[in-house]
Every structure is written in C-alpha cells, then in structure tokens.
Image (cartoon, helix red, strand yellow):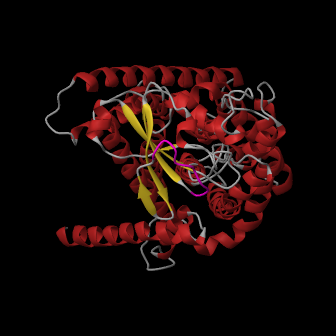
C-alpha cells in the first residue's frame, strides 16, 4: 500500500510541476493552458503511458469539488461595484440564456444528427454553461470595459447552477415523469434558496472573521475558503443549488474588508489553479483518443449550432431589455467560452448510464478542444475589431502588505497604451481625489518616484495607492482623462461606463 502511495505521489508531483511549467509555455505560444492540461491527461492515459482510468462517477465527484473551488475563487475576486450594474443582464444570461441555448442546440442536434429528443436536449444542457475557469483566466488578461468583463464573469459564476440542475433532470430515470411546470418550480426554488444560503453564510462569515482573533494569519485564508464550501454543503443538504451559494458567499467575503484579505485572495487563486490542473488532467485521463475520431462530425455540428445560433440568440433575448449596443452583443456572443464545465457535466449522463452518453462525452470533449483553441485566440482581435478595447483600466495587484490593510487601501496598476489621452498629461493634472496617489512610475524598465510635473508617456506603468472609499472615483477619473484628456470634466466626460 505504501509503495502504491509513493508511486502516486511521484506521478502526481511530476504532473503538477509539468502543468505549472506548461502555463509559461502556453502563454508564449498563445495556446490556452487548459488544452495543455487535457493533453497531459491524454498522454499519461491508457493510450499513452498506460494509466487506465474509466471511473465516470469518481470523475463527476472530483469535478464538482474542483468547480466549487474555481467558482469560489471567481466570487472572492469579483468586485461588487462592477457586478452591481450588470446583475440583471448576467442573471438573465444565466437563466433565460441557458434555456434558449438548450432549445436551439437540441433542435439542431435532433434533426441533423438524428438522435432522440432527450439526448439532443442533453447536448444542449451540457453545453449551456460558460466555463468560469476559462472566462476568469482569459478575460482578465484583456483590456476590456469593466462592465463587459463583469457581465461575462457573473454569468459564468451563476449559470453553472441551472445547467447542472437541468443536466441532472434530463439524465435521471424520472425524466418526463411529471409536468414541466413542476420542474420549473423546482429549478426556481433551488436557485432562490441557494442565493439565500450563500448570502447568509457570507454575511455570517464576514461578521465572524472581522471579530475573530485567530492565532495565525495563515488560518484566515483557510477559513474564508472553508466558508464558501460550507455554503455549498448547507445548500445542497437542503436541496438547493450549492454552486450559486458558493458564488454568492464568495462575492460577499471577497468584498468585505477582512483581515489579511490579500492573503485570502492569493490562497484562493492558488487553490483554483490546482483545481483546474487536476480537473483537466483527470478529464484527459477519462477520454479515449481511439474513440475521438468518430466524434469530430457531431462535435463540429453541435459547436457551430452553439456558436453561430444558440449563443447569439440567447444573448439577443437577454440583452434586448438593457442598454447593450450591437458591438457589446457581438462580443458577448463570441466570448461565451466553454471549458472543463461541459466535460464535467457530460460525466453526469455517463455515470447514470443514459443511452448515447459515451458519444455525447466524446463529442463534447472534441468540441471543447476545437472551439477553445479557436475562440480564446481570437478574443483580443475581436475586441479590437469591435473597438471595445479599453485604453486605461487600472487593475488591482494582489500584494500582501499589512500597512495597506490597516489603511483599508488597494494597490492599483495602470499601463498607458498608445492612443490614450493620458499621454502628455502631467501628474498633477490627473487631479486624483484625496486618499489616492501615484507612488511609482516604471518607464523603459526603470522605476522612479514621480514629481507633480512628471509628464506621462506611452508605455508608462503607474502604481497607484487608493483607499477603498475613493477607489471607484479614481478609476472613473483615469478613464475620463484617457478618453478626453486633461480637460475631461470641462468636456462633460466623467469616466462612466458606456454601452455604445
């Protein structure tokens, strides 16, 4: 037994280190890291190094555990000031959008691939959820308007819950055993009650962590992540949606001024990376490359139906009620990234023994590989083509600094690209609010403390310390000057988000 454990630890450590190194390589090559992890799983699998793994039920259980961690990290790192304006449209995309996507994909798959309605709707349900890991990992590297990023992140954090519920419903033997309105009421109950439990656990956790005097700073990150998992457990035990509870609890805790907040975010980020690596490698192990050739045609048909019909129609149906222009709608349609979540969801009918579940799993696996490679690589060009790139958007740096915590302040980084009206502006002309200051400028690889008359240049990187009270005002001011220059306020520009 000990020898087997030693061998497992050796293989696990080697895979983890190779996966960590692969992040650097994939970034340089422009290949999504999740595809590298899947490839590692396939390489060490039965058709590669010979490790045999075909336990769909275990994969489903471990996949759910990984999703809990990934969604918790997404909630913890989401800012409420960015989420609040987009909750309506993100909520519709996560509910009505899921239903529209299932219906459209189901119709296309039924008539073009000739499968029965139950399996066709399962194709739609499995693929209806955008992947939180893919969205969080990809969009935060792009220069996009915060509202657009927040919409996609909130949608990916919330739409796992209805997707899981519908896949389970379609996969169980009780399918079609009762009226549709009963299923709709059940779905509504699980989502609403899940939100309630997530809110309750989050508020209780915030109150406790603010007042608890734990003996070690390392216990605070463990307690914060443990609270998000507690939200999942409480919700699921009471037959509510655990995934939505995790996200809500994470958002509340992440937007609270907790002790050692930066350590909490760093710990959650590390756990999320481990969860992603383990999940993708495990899914690669479960796949069988010898079967994948037969899945290419179903994957292409289903993928084209999803990307060209289902996703655009779902976005249109959900955003028509809000101030979203055609460029935003086009990007939202193209940026509905699929990743590990659809493959995990495909293990549900596989573990339930649904007829046709094996071809479904293979088709989803191939689809995720093809369309992740296609979509992820084209997001940045698509944003530029649609003129959605944001010239100046400060990003929070996760630096563990006790003085900043005591002052309730954040450290922001701002890079000045070509075309920004910030170029040529003197530092004192920024007129940042009291409580914010540019503390360092990095130019041509050299950092220096700026003076009030320092003139900003293309390529400058600014470090800005801002208290929590004025952080949003700082971002609006920088956005306004980037658009209209030093006379932004005189020209009626206040840096508010625009949907044009």
Total tally of numbered discs in the picture = 0
* Residue at the image position 33 percent from the left and 32 percent from the top: 227
Residue 471 in the image, given as x and y percentages of width and height: 49, 31
Taking the spot 80% from the left edge, 56% from the top edge, the residue there is: 304
Q: Quadrant of the N terminus?
A: bottom left
Residue 350 belongs to magenta span: no
Q: Would you say 357 lies left or right of 474 here?
A: right
- In the rendered image, residue 31, in percent from the top left (x then y), is placed at 60, 67
Q: Residue at x 73, y 43 (%)?
A: 332
- What residue occupies the far bottom of the structure in this picture? 49
Q: Is residue 479 above or below residue 213?
A: below
Boundaries of the magenta span:
451-459
Q: Residue 165: in sight, yes or no?
A: no
Along the line of sight, the residue nearer the viewer: 347 or 394: 394
Asked whether, in this view, residue 305 is left or right of residue 352, the answer is right
- The reply to whether residue 201 is visible in this rendering is yes
Quadrant location of the C terminus in the rendered image: top right
Q: Position of residue 435 (x, y in %)?
A: 42, 29
When asked about the image quadrant of residue 467, the answer is top left
């Amino acid at each position: 037994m000990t020898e087997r454990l030693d061998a497992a630890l050796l293989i696990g450590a080697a895979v983890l280190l190779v996966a960590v190194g692969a992040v650097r390589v994939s970034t340089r090559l422009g290949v999504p890291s999740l595809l590298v992890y899947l490839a590692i799983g396939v390489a060490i699998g039965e058709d590669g190094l010979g490790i045999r793994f075909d336990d769909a039920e275990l994969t489903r259980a471990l996949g759910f555990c990984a999703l809990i961690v990934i969604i918790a990290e997404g909630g913890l790192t989401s800012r409420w000031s960015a989420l609040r304006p987009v909750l309506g449209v993100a909520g519709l995309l996560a509910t009505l959008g899921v239903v529209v996507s299932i219906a459209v994909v189901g119709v296309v798959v039924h008539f073009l691939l000739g499968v029965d309605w139950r399996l066709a709707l399962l194709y739609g349900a499995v693929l209806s959820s955008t992947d939180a890991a893919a969205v969080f990992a990809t969009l935060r590297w792009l220069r996009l308007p915060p509202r657009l990023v927040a919409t996609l992140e909130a949608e990916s954090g919330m739409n796992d819950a209805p997707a899981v519920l519908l896949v389970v419903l379609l996969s169980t033997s009780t399918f079609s055993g009762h009226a549709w309105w009963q299923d709709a009421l059940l779905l509504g109950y699980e989502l609403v009650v899940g939100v309630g439990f997530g809110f309750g656990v989050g508020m209780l956790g915030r109150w406790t962590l603010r007042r608890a005097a734990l003996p070690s700073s390392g216990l605070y990150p463990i307690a914060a992540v443990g609270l998000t998992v507690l939200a999942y457990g409480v919700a699921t035990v009471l037959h509510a949606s655990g995934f939505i509870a995790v996200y809500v609890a994470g958002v509340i805790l992440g937007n609270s001024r907790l002790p050692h907040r930066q350590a909490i975010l760093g710990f959650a980020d590390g756990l999320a990376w481990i969860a992603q690596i383990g999940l993708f490698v495990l899914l690669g192990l479960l796949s069988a490359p010898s079967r994948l050739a037969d899945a290419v045609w179903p994957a292409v048909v289903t993928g084209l139906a999803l990307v060209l019909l289902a996703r655009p129609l779902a976005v249109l149906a959900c955003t028509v009620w809000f101030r979203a222009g055609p460029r935003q709608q086009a990007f939202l349609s193209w940026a509905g990234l699929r990743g590990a979540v659809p493959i995990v969801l495909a293990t549900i009918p596989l573990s339930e023994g649904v007829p046709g579940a094996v071809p479904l799993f293979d088709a989803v696996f191939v689809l995720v590989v093809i369309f992740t490679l296609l979509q992820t690589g084209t997001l940045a060009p698509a944003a530029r083509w649609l003129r959605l790139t944001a010239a100046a958007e400060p990003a929070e740096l996760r630096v563990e600094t006790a003085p900043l915590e005591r002052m309730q302040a954040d450290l922001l980084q701002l890079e000045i690209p070509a075309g920004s009206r910030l170029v040529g502006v003197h530092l004192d002309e920024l007129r940042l609010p009291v409580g914010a200051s540019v503390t360092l400028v990095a130019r041509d690889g050299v950092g220096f403390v700026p003076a009030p008359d320092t003139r900003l240049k293309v390529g400058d990187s600014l470090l800005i310390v801002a208290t929590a009270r004025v952080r949003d005002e700082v971002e609006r001011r920088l956005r306004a000057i980037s658009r209209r220059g030093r006379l932004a306020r005189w020209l009626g520009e206040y840096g508010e988000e625009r949907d044009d």
